[in-house]
Amino acid sequence: MITIKNMSFRYGKHRMVFDRLNMEMKAGYIYGLLGENGVGKTTLLRLLAGLRFPTQGSVEVLGFTPSQRRTEFLSDLYYLPEVIDVVPLSMNEYVKRYAPFYPRFDYDKFNYYLEEWNIDPAQKLSQSSHGQQKKAMMSFALACNTRLLLLDEPTNGMDIPSKGIFRRLLAQASDDDKCFVVSTHQVRDLENLIDPILILEKNQVLLNNTVEEITKKLWFGVKSEKSDHDLYREECIGGYAVVDYNDRHEESHLNIEMLFNAAIQNKSLFKRMFIEEQQVPHSDFSEEMRQKLYKDHE
Amino acid sequence: MNNIISLRRVGLLLCNEFRKNGKTYIIFISILAGMYILAGIFGGIVGLKSITGTQYIAALTVLLPFVIYKDLFHPVKGLNATLLPASNEEKYLTAFLQCAVIFPLGMIFGFWLLTVLSALLTGHNDLIWNVGILFVDRNSSYGSFSLGFFDSWFWQIVACQSFSLWAVHFFKTKKFWRAVLTWFCICFVLLTIGSITAFRIIMWQNDGMGFDFAGSTRFAHILHIFFAILLPIGFWVWGYRKMRKQQF
């Protein structure tokens, strides 16, 4: 569904955001796009939506080149930015104006989403709270029924029950033909929903794998004592919450926040393990960790 | 063909534009009506006869794109329009139809209606605006050389507006002021070239050198065609190309 080949992108002449990025995203998944501030999550979404053009390389989305912004492409994509343009319209008016452009817009589902979120379709968006606006636009985005849905920080401004509804509605809306890409910092809001997980690093992708692939290589759990080769650990009740190399091939429950912190702290190792798909021997791994700890200590 | 230009989508886009810009239209028509009423109040019948809608309509038509497309490439406000499933051609055609056809015609009709109303109220039938003359050759000062409709008043305001339409698609922010600055630069360059040419001609004549009037008339015709037809079309095409390449 999305193929990125050797894509580079920079702002101006010097601010490189992506350097020969390669990536694939398939239909039938809800991708979680994670990364530190400023690594280019929003830029990547805008490149996929055709709002920004790559400096080099190619981006292919739904079989189209996004920068051409062709009608067939735009009618199969919906991009919901983090900051919404608040129009002085009610959702009823908004739908009347914009839904006819989306050939598969589902009016029944739209009403269902609004009901679920308890949104009054007659109320003007400009008179609603930020969270209400987000939910109203999310309802529209889901009802457009596009094959590709790009969501930038969708849960920002939503209250706790709304986040639960969001997870449920997104899961209901996804099917084998659709691909959702959700960029977020609020990883806990999307736990058990996003799979695969895509972590962006400066200029590069650090990880683009399914939860199954990740938990095959990494172990998430609690240990009573810390060890030299913990990829990442946090103090918790009963010891340390740890991300470790899964050398015993045990099953564990992925903790996205821990994974993200581990990835950020062990960038080169993650790249070797997940992007270059190297089988990192445990001995090498331990040694690398030891060296890293030594460096950190220094 | 349907994917490039669909009449249904152009119609939908136009409807959306009218709904979105309804307030602007009302304000512009109110300005025009206000001017006319003020002329009537302070100048009576003479005032109403002296006021020519053409100047006001021209000014409002040239200003229109800056008002309705000020947020066209705004990173937040511009997204809705850019990502709306319609082709670039349809979106540009909508902008063109709205700015260069529907709005000026609407304003002309509005002003004509005002003159008809004032004629009915005052009983002076000669107050009614002769709209027909706006679409025919203005008998320009180029002798027998005429471009027909392209020398009409209507085409001239549309041609002037092509610069505005280009500017709103060319500049991402501060569209109006950048356009004004660009306009001054163009005028300065043209005036400089014109002055130098005129000075040269005078010098040649003073030196007793022959001056090819037939050649200069031909050159004037070429300039006339360039400024009246090619330049506006060039601005429209350039504006369209810039729209396709704008990033957010």
Image (tube, rainbow, N blue to C red):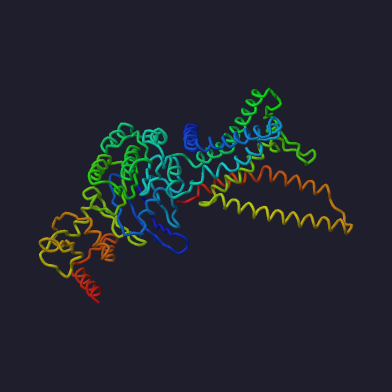
Q: Residue shown at 35%/49% (left/top)?
A: A82
* Camera-nearest residue between A106 and A98: A98
**Compared with residue A100, is residue A28 higher up or lower down, i.e. above or below?**
below
Q: Left or right of B110: which side holds A176?
A: left
Q: Residue at x 54, y 47 (%)?
A: B168
- Measured as percent of width and height from the top left, residue A164 is found at 22, 44
Give residue A271's position: percent from left, percent from top: 29, 63
The vertical placement of A30 against B146, above or below, is below
Residue A172 position by quadrant: top left
Query: What is the x, y in percent for residue A252?
Result: 15, 55
Q: Pick out the residue farthest to the right.
A: B208
Residue furthest out toward the front = B42
Residue at image x 56%, y 41%?
B64
Q: In which quadrant of the rendered view does residue A171 lie?
A: top left
Percent position of residue B142, x then y:
78, 41
Q: How many marks?
A: 0
Residue closer to the observer: A21 or B125 = B125
In this image, A154 relative to B205: left or right?
left
Q: Quadrant of residue B116?
A: top right
Q: Is residue B33 left or right of residue A167?
A: right
Q: On the rendered structure, is A175 left or right of B33?
A: left
Q: Is residue A2 above or below residue A264?
A: above
| B197 or B229: nearer the viewer | B197
Outermost residue toward the bottom? Answer: A298
Compared to residue A252, the image places residue B232 above or below, namely: above
